[in-house]
Image (cartoon, helix red, strand yellow):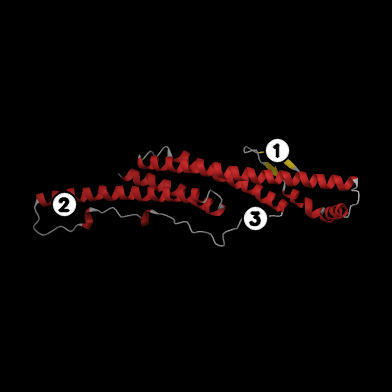
Amino acid sequence: MTLLEPDADGQLAWEDDCVDLFDLAGDLLDAAVARLKAGMKPTAKDIALLTEAARTAQRAFKEVGAANDVLDDASDLGEDLANALANSLKRQARTEVPALLGALRAQAARVERSETVRTIANRILGNGGPDEPDTQVPIPALTADLLPRVPSVYDDEEEPGASLADFWERQERLERLQDRVRRERVEHVATHLLALAEKIVDRAFRDTRFTRAALDEMDRAYALWCVCLDEG
């Protein structure tokens, strides 16, 4: 069994072959336990095998606990990031959003690493792994075509016999409508971005496939949001 250096969360990066400790030595371990139950004196090899098995199991329990701590921490930080994102979107602070999206992605990677360690630890302990979703939860993709269309002057047919005053009135009405629709487009994309962030946090970053897809969609939505801001 090989244990590598601890990562930033204090969890050990376990080489996958370490889970074979009990599989490869299963018969020997069972034999050693059987001899102890029969009241026989354990051999030096029995003692070494049982000691190593106990140490590995103890370490596995610690890793499961550490993974729980990572989840709790990521959940709290994820909520803070989602709240910060909501604030930045409300203020239309476009330069702040990329850093928040990057922080969400960093937390997702941290949880993914930690859950990999948990899976190995659970295999060592003989526990089943986490339930995998049967199907991928679809991520709604938002494109410019799905946003409210900004009306143009060509949408308003000129009435026969209209005066110049009527023309300027229609023009002012059109500009007010265009401004309102542009604001709606910005708000629509912002709502989409925030909803994805909240879904990621609600799942505590644990649904890896969903989280990756949602983060990729958030990057695209941010670019669309910036385009909508520029329209105003």
> Which residue is at a point 65% across and 48% down the rendered structure image?
118
Give the mark nearer the N terminus: 3 vs 1.
1
Give the mark nearer the N terminus: 3 vs 2.
3
Residue under circle 2?
170
Q: Quadrant of residue 151?
A: bottom left
Secondary structure under tag 2 reads helix
Badge 3, how many Cα within 10 Å: few under 14, some, many 20+? few
Is label 3 or label 2 in front? 3
> Could you tell me if residue 1 is visible in this image?
no
Q: Please tell me whether residue 102 is drawn above or below residue 163 in the rendered image.
A: above
Is label 3 or label 1 in front? 3
Q: Quadrant of residue 127?
A: bottom right
> Which residue is at a point 72% across and 49% down the rendered structure image?
16
Residue under circle 1?
5
For the N terminus, which image quadrant? top right
For the residues labelled 3 and 1, say whether their Cβ atoms are less than 8 Å apart: no
Q: Position of residue 121 (x, y in %)?
A: 69, 49
> Which residue is at a point 13% across and 59% down the rendered structure image?
159
Give the mark nearer the N terminus: 2 vs 1.
1
What whole-number distance in Å separates the C-alpha atoms at marks 3 and 2?
A: 65 Å
Residue under circle 3?
129
Q: Left or right: 183 with respect to 40?
A: left
What whole-number distance in Å separates the C-alpha atoms at marks 3 and 1?
A: 24 Å
